[in-house]
Image: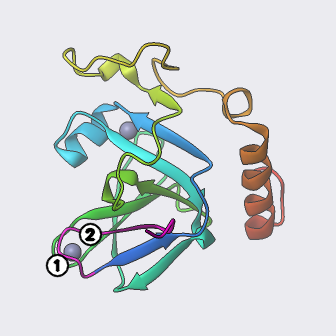
Amino acid sequence: MSNAIEGGCFCGRIRYRLKACPMFVHCCHCSDCQRQMGSAFVINGIVEAENVDLLQGAPVMITLSTNSGRPHDVYRCADCQSALWSDYGRRKWLSFVRLATLDRPSAFPPDVHIYIRSKLDWVPLPAGARAFDEYYDVQAEWPKESLDRLNKARTRATGSARS
Ligand SMILES: [Zn+2]
Ligand SMILES: [Zn+2]
């Protein structure tokens, strides 16, 4: 069995491979994710966009509004409409991959549970889970290797260490 991290949409038209493990994994319980998914939460693995390799097909982008006013671009299969990844704020260099579209959807358990203020009452959190009412402090929670990757990707894309 290969160790490749691969996934795809429901109908199989789009297949992708992650060239690196996610830097950090969110289980997001916010009401936007709930309504967009029609589900209790979404599991997002954050990776550099350049580490998402399309193997087959090409997703289409739709843009959703957010409270922050920055666009939320969702990349979907044009046929079956599965959402594969998101680009929050249209950065172009950072992808939030919907990890339940992986062939092994349990491969990367969440590092944090966020926006638990809107978590459905009957969804329990695992013992010891790091959970936040809303968002959290990236510098405080991400492992150093992941912060290094994030900063490198940002610098490559924007020429600046902060954005
Ligand atoms: Zn599809
Ligand atoms: Zn959310």
Q: Is mark 1 within 8 Å of ligand 1?
A: yes
- Determine whether the residue tagged by mark 2 lies in a helix, strand or loop: loop
Task: State which mark lies toward you, 2 or 1.
Answer: 2
Identify which residue is drawn at 75% across, 44% down.
147
- Looking at the image, in which quadrant does ligand 1 appear? bottom left
Task: From the viewer's perspective, tell me whether residue 74 is left or right of residue 38.
Answer: right
The picture places residue 124, in percent across and down from the top left corner, at 29, 17
| Residue indicated by mark 1 | 79
Count of numbered marks: 2
Q: Is mark 2 within 8 Å of ligand 1?
A: yes
Does the magenta segment cover residue 104?
Answer: no
Does the magenta segment cover residue 7?
Answer: yes
Q: Residues within 10 Å of mark 2 (few under 14, many from 20)?
A: many
Magenta highlight range: 1-13
Disc 2/disc 1 C-alpha distance (Å) = 9 Å
Q: Residues within 10 Å of mark 1 (few under 14, many from 20)?
A: some
